[in-house]
Structures are given as C-alpha cells and as structure tokens.
Image: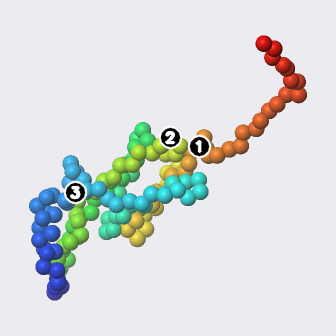
Amino acid sequence: MLMRTDPFRELDRLTQQFLATTGTWTRPTPMPLDAYRTGDEYVICFDLPGVDPQAIDIDVERNMLTVKAERRPRPEADGARMELSERPLGVFSRQVMLSDTLDPDGITADYDAGVLTLRIPVAEKAKPRKVAISHSGDRKQIRA
C-alpha cells in the first residue's frame, strides 16, 4: 500500500473535487502548453499524459485552433481496487488564436510520451523577402 507523508494533500484533493476541477464536456479543464517559433514554423506542445491518442480532437475554424482531449479512468483489472488517485480525469480543452501570418492548412500533429506537438508553418506572405528597387536613368526636375 502507498502511504502519504503530506497531511494536507488529502485536504487539497478534496478541495479540488469540491470545486469541480475535473473537466466535463460543458466545463473542460485547461491543459498546459508551451509555444515557440523555430525557423519558418511555430511549435505548440500540449501536456496530455495518460491520454489515448484516439481521445484527442484537433480543429481549426476561422484561425481558432481548438484541442480537446479526454482522460478516462482505467478499468479495474482482476478485482483490483483503486487505493490512490491523484491524476485528473475528464475533459481537457485549450483554444489558441492563430494569426493571419500562419498557414492553418499545413498543421501537423505528433503525439509522443504524453506530449501533443503541433507544428504550424509560417505563411509565405509573412516570410521576410527582399524588395527590388527600380530606378530610371531619366531625371526630371520639378520647377515651382
């Protein structure tokens, strides 16, 4: 059996349960994320440990990226009974507004070791480019 040494942990767990921190479809829990730019793409990493990849849903509508996931309880095997449960269950959701400088059609997703990684390419129109300067050999003077 597992024993806890923190007497306030159980109080914290009960408080979280009382305040309904477990996500529901009508009130999902936000998931932590990191976002950064590398080269010509933005990378967003969502922490989703213990979530089945089939339970992850990614949508983009009008530059709004929505990631939803659900962590379900594990079925008790061979009459086993849960002794300690601290990992949150339920629905997790996060929305990120994508700027017009990103290409939502080119998004790729990868799920590895409990981390969902989305790669969003920068749109061609937003990439830096050189502007050629043209000039004509004829100069005209303007007289007032």
Image position of 23 (left or right of 111) = left
Q: Amino acid at mark 3?
A: Gly
Residue 88 in percent (x, y) is at 23, 65
Q: Nearer the viewer, mark 3 or mark 2?
A: 2
Q: CA distance from mark 3 to mark 1?
A: 37 Å
Look at 31% across and 69% down and name the residue there: 50
The residue at 35%/49% (across/down) is: 95
* Residue tagged 1: 126
Secondary element at image label 3: loop
Mark 3 or mark 1: whose residue is earlier in sequence = 3
| Amino acid on which the number 1 mark rests in the picture | Ala
- Vertical position of residue 109 compared to residue 63: above or below: below
- The answer to whether the residue labelled 3 contacts the one labelled 2, judged by CB atoms less than 8 Å apart, is no
Residue 63 in sight here: yes
Counting from the top left corner in percent of width and height, residue 96 is at 39, 49
Residue 4 sits in quarter: bottom left
Q: In whole angstroms, how far apart are the C-alphas of marks 3 and 2?
A: 31 Å
Which residue is denoted by mark 2 in the rendering?
100
Tag 2 near tag 1, CB within 8 Å = yes
Gap in angstroms between the C-alphas marked 2 and 1: 8 Å
Sequence-first tag of 3 and 2 = 3
Q: Position of residue 30 (x, y in %)?
A: 29, 56
- Amino acid bearing label 2: Asp
Q: Which residue is mark 3?
A: 23
